[in-house]
Image (cartoon, grey):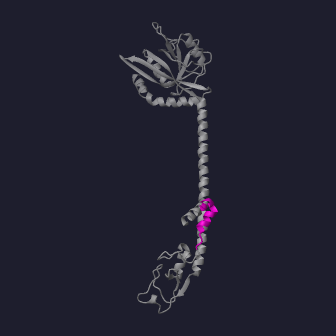
Amino acid sequence: MWLMLRGAKASWHHLSYSVLVLCFLAIQGSKSDVLWTANVNYSYVMENKTYWDEGEIGVYGHDSPVDRAYGLVVLPRRRQHHYSPSQCPPHLNFSVPESYNNAWIALIQRGDCPFSDKIKAAAEAGAKAVVIYNNEGNENGVFEMSHPGTKDTIAIMIGFIKGMEIVQLVRSNIQVTMVIEVGRKHGSWMNHYSIFFVSISFFVVTAATVGYFIFYSARRWRHTRAQNQKMKKLKDEAKKAISRLQLRTIKQGDKVLGPDGDSCAVCIDAYKANDVVRILTCNHFFHKNCIDPWLLEHRTCPMCKCDILKSLGIAVSYTDKILQMYFPHRLGKMQITAQLQIT
């Protein structure tokens, strides 16, 4: 039995967190507006050593005063050599030591009759407070009891495991002293407002994210559209410029066919007779079939980077047109700045 008590005591710190979680679950299901937890501290002497344990393991009943209580833990009295921890009035009596005249706390198991009946019977027998521990199978689960008509009797509920630990000590003729302290206050309105706050926050964040995505997508679409229009316009201008560039057919005897002849810088092949070449404004020339696709995309000489649009005077400030179309205010500022620089 002592090994069982020791093992239960060692695992208590691991179970306390579960108790708190279950308490919060109980809060959510409670019909009351406010719920108070209880800090339970019990101690006992064994083999000339004092042991104690404490934790926020209890919940005050709905009709209980939220107050402090102190006293010796007392169990219901055995009846005809049979112990029933959940027995109810009129057979619910308590085995208070004959020489004990101080405050005591009744420890009763849940079941068989309403909480009010158990608490009233304990109070009439002289209990300062009543601790109801849950039934087997609920582990350390607790909830807020409803026990109308119990007046000023302090009543809390604790879990089955912790309740049985204390019962085993008392059954072994070990005096257990308990102190019940007021824990923390929890209100169902806190949960409602928390859910409301989280919902509003989620909506705001979602709306902001969607809004930013729409704004970014629209801006990206406008930028891409402007770029595509610009490239289309530049290709149209490049076609005009290419059509104005001189074409020439290489003939036998041209210098480019001699021992020191040139080769096309695009395809790296040597020029041959009857090759058609296009002569750029910078006087560099290349195979027509090589340079035309290049000029259509780049509009510059592959060797000296000469811009054929500017050289032929075809280059219209298409960038200004785009700015005027999509960002008229920016173009106005740029024009004013340019005028100031010229003057």
Is 319 a magenta residue? yes
x and y percentages locating residue 130 in the rendered image: 53, 17
Q: Which residues are magenta?
A: 315-332
Q: Nearer the viewer, residue 140 or 248?
A: 248
The mark tally for this picture is: 0
The C terminus - image quarter:
bottom right
Is 333 rendered above or below residue 123? Answer: below
Is 323 rendered above or below residue 311? Answer: above
Magenta span: helix, strand or loop, mainly?
Answer: helix
The N terminus - image quarter:
top left
Quarter where residue 52 is shown? top left
Name of the residue lying farthest toward the front? 343
Q: Is residue 133 visible?
A: no
Q: Residue at x 44, y 16 (%)?
A: 176
Is 99 rendered above or below residue 262? Answer: above
Q: Nearer the viewer, residue 4 or 285?
A: 285
Q: Residue at x 45, y 23 (%)?
A: 54
x and y percentages locating residue 76 in the rendered image: 52, 14
Q: Is residue 157 visible?
A: yes
Q: Residue at x 61, y 47 (%)?
A: 207
